[in-house]
Amino acid sequence: MSDWQPCASHDALHLRASLNRLVREFFHVRDVLEVETPVMSQAGNTEPNIASFALEFSGRTDGAPRTRWLRTSPEYALKRLLAAGIGDCYELGRVFRDGEAGGRHNPEFSMLEWYRVGWNHEHLIEEAAALVQAALALVGRSGQLRVVRYRDLYRDALGIDPFTADDEALRVALGDVLIDPQGLGRDDWLDLLMTHRLQPAFKTDDMLAVIDYPASQCALARIAGDAEGHPVAQRFELYLGPLELANGYNELLDPSEQEKRFARDLCVREARGAVVPPMDTRLLGALASGLPACAGVALGMDRLLMAMLGTTHIANVLAFDFPRA
């Protein structure tokens, strides 16, 4: 038997170490503080399409819940630090998502997340692209950044307007991609068009930043009007070739709006029969105390390594993937 052996080559593991070192140097010279936040939390991620792992603590809790949730990102804890006045900060560490295993996914993976006080998401695009450029230089490559509006991307590539097309038009645009429609909503069809029709056509060395997402896909981003009067989420996703690397927001500051979004997420989960985790009231408290205007972005380190090495298999950049863990 050889399943004790690592999945990744020695070269890939050395490259991961070099990338981690580059990240820390990148932020050190920019005076962005590295921090560490809890991996286990009393609250889970409410986002309907992300599943959190839960575990039971057997020791003394002094009345606190025994159920703890493994973080799907360090976002909420980092925002609590921002509200406490820590300033620009980042975390590089492991995060966990249940049900995500396969060629491009592993239930535990490495995420880099950082926040810039006083910036918006468009400023952050430039810094995220600079980091990716520096990473590509480690393997003798470079990429050209291009920024495109979500609406223009769908119009130009698929001939449909993602803001006005009905659900049937979105299903037809999938062509011969067969998907069970049970329980799928409008944003699910738009996501499927992105992953099955648009991303595969992205050029290998193109860094594509997609901005002005539909307001329904705001997550934790602010909403504003675009040039045509449509409400859009002030967020971006950064792609390198067909791989999505990063997701960034001009961060929502309003605690009441955030609580409404949490509640809406939980209603969707309940309707789907999914687990309904407790919402993060400490994050709401931090927002109420005054989160400074900021922009934040989460970048998948394993995805970046995959793009750097030109592989579509996450196992090729992990010491041990889920089947060998």
Image: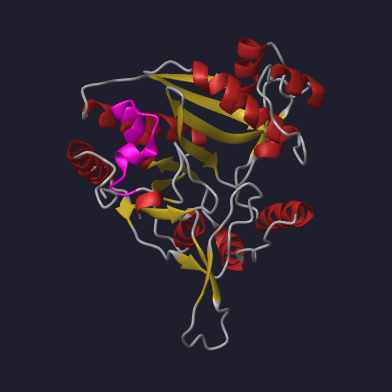
Q: Where residue 38 sits in the image (x, y, percent)?
A: 42, 66
Q: Where residue 228 sits in the image (x, y, percent)?
A: 72, 20
User: Image height check: is 189 above or below 63?
Assistant: above
As for residue 306 lying within the magenta part, the answer is: yes
Q: Is residue 237 left or right of residue 15?
A: right
Residue 90 seen anywhere in this rendered image of the structure = no
User: Image height check: is 159 above or below 13?
Assistant: above
Number of numbered labels in the structure image = 0
Q: Is residue 151 left or right of residue 300?
A: right
- Quick one: quadrant of the C terminus? bottom left
Residue found at the far front of this picture: 1
Magenta range: 305-320
Residue 158 seen anywhere in this rendered image of the structure = yes
Q: Is residue 49 left or right of residue 131?
A: right
Residue at horizontal 49 percent and vertical 26 percent from the top:
209
As for residue 87 lying within the magenta part, the answer is: no
Specify the quadrant of the image occupied by residue 27: top left
Residue at horizontal 38 percent and vertical 38 percent from the top:
314
Which colour scheme appears in the figure? secondary structure
Q: Where residue 184 sits in the image (x, y, percent)?
A: 75, 38
Q: Is residue 270 left or right of residue 291?
A: right
Q: Where residue 266 sits in the image (x, y, percent)?
A: 72, 57
Residue at horizontal 34 percent and vertical 59 percent from the top:
35
Residue at horizontal 62 percent and vertical 16 percent from the top:
152
